[in-house]
Amino acid sequence: MVINELLAPAQPITWLPWAVQYFFLIGLAYGALWFGAADLWRKEQDPRLQTLAAVLMVAAGLVAPIALTADLHQPARAWHFYAQTRFGSVMWYGAYLLPLFSLLSMLLGWLLLRPALARRGAEGDKIGRLARLLCLGSWSGRVWQRPLSLLAAVSGLSIALYTGLETMAVAARPLWHTPWLPWLLTLSAVLGAQSALLLLNRLLAGWRALTESTLLRQSGWTLSLLALSLLGWALLGGASAAEAAALYRLDPSWRLAAHWLLLTLGLAGLLMLLRPRISARLSLWGLALLGLHLVWGLRWLVLIQGQLAPKYGAGVYLYEIAWGPAGVLGILGTFGLLLALLVALSELVRPSVSPAIKAPTPFAREAL
């Protein structure tokens, strides 16, 4: 009897945890943008939701490209995308779509934040003066909000397609090479934005019950649709679902991550069902944190754990996350930068606590 032994030499993964951070943060950015833009077209607008969406889209939209640039391994080579044409490369298109999205989302976020900045600028402290300066005058920006929201929403859709297609385009990885992937990433990004907005509504001064109830109701539908979509992928995903099943059998780390993700999904669904019977604060914090964890975990499972299957070969690779910038430190650093920006923006748009300043000043009325 002849025994043929198949060897799969260990290969380092190409997409580092920086990619997970980018996919997660850019999803929060375009998800928040869609919510803020959609509210501008409602008959009864929610200024609180618009402010929260603007804070999230600006903060996440600034940090996400930094994570993507770090994942290039040599960030200085980013100029290569512009020095040559690659019409067959999804990433080449992304090199133009991402800066356009950053520009439009920053402009829309600034317009949505101007009313809050104007009210904050009515205070005489240093931060109030900075907020007034950021308004760039006392003109009204409402006439520009709706047209810009349409352009920004379309740009957000292009980023959602780009981030899904750049992964789906890798035909050598059956797990990624499925039309289900862009849909799952986009839908989970919407859930992540809803969860983050729920937390911001509680953490930032000016909590509004109507905003919270609306986001909770919408997140319930999004969570249900995501669960059904994951089930549809598992049943109808073809080679992608088969690859996931093989990784589940062969790789203990994949199996652990999959169990953890399913447990998170189950707990979130259970909290959603029990929400009328338990504490409102417990259900809100639980749903928001579980939602964010589910969205981030899905990206980790697909992007990092999915690279443990060799493109050409047998077996699975072993992966140990590094403690430095390419691993844990990079993850903590990105979240730390996001938190710092959220804190800074929250102070700039903080509602006034002084009764004398609650009435709009002439400057604030003009900026509204």
Image (spheres, grey):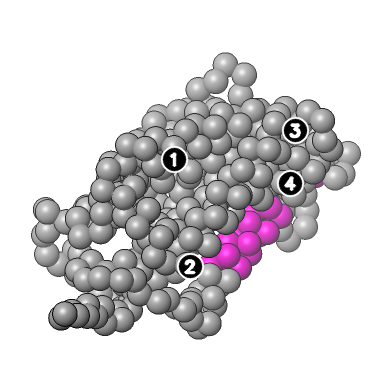
Q: Secondary structure at mark 3?
A: helix
First-in-chain label (1 vs 3): 1
Q: Residue furthest top?
A: 43
* Closer-to-camera residue (276/211): 276
How far across and how far down the image is residue 290, in percent? 64, 49
Earlier sequence position, callout 4 versus callout 1 = 1
Disc 1 element:
helix
Q: Main secondary structure of the magenta part?
A: helix
For disc 4, the marked residue is 285
Q: Position of residue 351 (x, y in %)?
A: 76, 43
Residue under circle 3?
A: 274
Q: Residue at x 59, y 40 (%)?
A: 194
Find the magenta span and give its range: 334-352
Query: Which amino acid, mark 3?
Result: Leu
Residue 45: image tag = none
Q: Earlier in the sequence, mark 4 or mark 3?
A: 3
Three-letter code for the amino acid on which mark 4 is drawn: Trp
Amino acid under disc 1: Leu
- In percent of the image, x 71 and y 55: which residue is there? 347
Q: Nearer the viewer, residue 237 or 201?
A: 237
Marks 2/3: CA distance? 31 Å
**Could one spot residue 211 in this view of the protein?**
no
Crowd around label 4: few <14 · some 14–19 · many ≥20 (10 Å): some
Q: Nearer the viewer, mark 4 or mark 3?
A: 3
Q: Which residue is mark 2?
A: 253
Q: Which residue is mark 1?
A: 230
Which of 148 and 20 lies nearest the eye of the viewer?
20
Give the spatial CA distance, label 4 vs label 3.
Answer: 14 Å
| Discs 2/3, front | 2
